Image (cartoon, grey):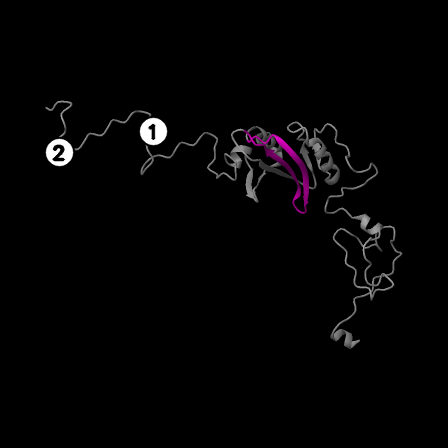
Amino acid sequence: MSEPNEPAEPGASLPEPAETPGAARPDGPGSEPPAQAPGESDEETVGWLPRSATDLFGEGASAEEAYALLTVDVPAQRWISALEAARDALGCTYFDWLSAVDEPGTGFRVCAHLAALPTVERAGVRRLVLRTTVSHEAPVLPTATGVFAGAGWHERETHEMFGVDFTGHPHLVPLLLPDEFEGRPLRKDFVLAARVAKAWPGAKEPGESEHGGPKRRQMLPPGVPDPNEWGPLKGQLPPAPARPARGRAAGAG
C-alpha cells in the first residue's frame, strides 16, 4: 500500500476528480443545453430587442427591422400593454408621434413612433415603431394618453382624418378641420372635391388655351370624379371629345 504523497508509477492512470454537486458542466458532446427561463420562447430576437417579440409584447406580436428602423406589430387588444412594455422594458420613454395609414382591404394601421434616448451605459438613439390594425367597419382603439400623455393631440388628428375612435380619450374633438367639414380627408375613399371645384393654377392643357392644339383625352387621378357628373359644374360641361382614330381605323373612316 502506497503512501498518500507517493508519486504514481509510470503509465498508471490518474483517478478522475470527484464531481461537485451543483457544479456547472463544460459545454461539449453530451452536455445538456442551458435551461430555458420560464415564459421565454425559442424565437430569434430581431434588431436591438433583448428577447423575442412574443416574450416582450405577448402572443401574436411580430418584429422586423429595415433601414435601421425596428417595427413591431401587435394585435389591437394588446395595444396598451405593448406601449407599456416598450416604455418600461425597452426604455422607450420618448413619444415622437402617432398616426394611421388607410390600407384598402386590410383596415387602418395605427403607428406609434417611440424612441429610447441615450444613457450613461448606452450611446445612440434606439427607435421603435409600434403598429396595430383596426378594421374599417369598427375602427376603435383604446387611447394611449394613459401611457404617453403627448399622444392626445395625435389621436385627435388621427380621429378627424381617418375616423379612428380612441376610447377613453379625455377630449376627442376636431383639431385642424372646421366644424362644418364633412368626411375623413385621409381615407382612400374620400372624394377630393377641391380638385373639381377649383381650377388648376398651372399651365393649361392642350385645347384649353387660345394657343394650344387639339384637346387630348382627360385623365383623372384616383379619387377625383368627372366634373361633369359631380360638383358645381355638373351637367354644364360639353362631353369630352372621343379619342381620334389611328392607323387602319383612321384610313377606314
Residue 231, compared with residue 23, is above or below; it is below
Image x and y of residue 48, in percent: 52, 37
| Helix, strand or loop at mark 1 | loop
Q: Residues within 10 Å of mark 1 (few under 14, many from 20)?
A: few
Q: Is residue 223 above or below residue 142?
A: below
Residue 200 at x, y percent in the picture: 82, 53
Residue 150 is covered by the magenta coloring = no
User: Callout 2: few (<14), some (14-19), or many (20+) C-alpha neighbours within 10 Å?
Assistant: few
Instruction: Please say whether residue 74 is visible from this viewpoint.
Output: no
* Residue at position x 22%, y 30% in the image: 16
User: Which of 3/250 is in front?
Assistant: 3
| Screen quadrant of the N terminus | top left
Tell me the residue at 17%/33% (across/down): 13
Question: Mark 2 sits on what residue?
Answer: 10
Give me the disc on residue 63: none
Displayed quadrant of residue 166: top right
Q: From the viewer's perspective, is 193 left or right of 152?
A: right
Query: Would you say residue 118 sits in the magenta stretch?
Result: yes
- Secondary element under disc 2, as helix, strand or loop, is loop
What amino acid is at disc 1? Ala
Q: Nearer the viewer, residue 194 or 6?
A: 6
Which of disc 2 and disc 1 is earlier in sequence? 2
Where is residue 63? Give x, y as percent: 55, 40
Query: Which residue is disc 1 drawn over?
Result: 24
User: Which-is-in-front pick, marks 1 and 2?
Assistant: 2
Magenta stretch: dominant secondary structure: strand
Q: Quadrant of residue 226?
A: bottom right
Asked if one can make out residue 10 in the rendered structure from this viewpoint, the answer is yes
Residue drawn at 82 percent across, 63 percent down: 206
Q: Residue at x 74, y 75 (%)?
A: 248
Q: Which residues are magenta?
A: 90-119
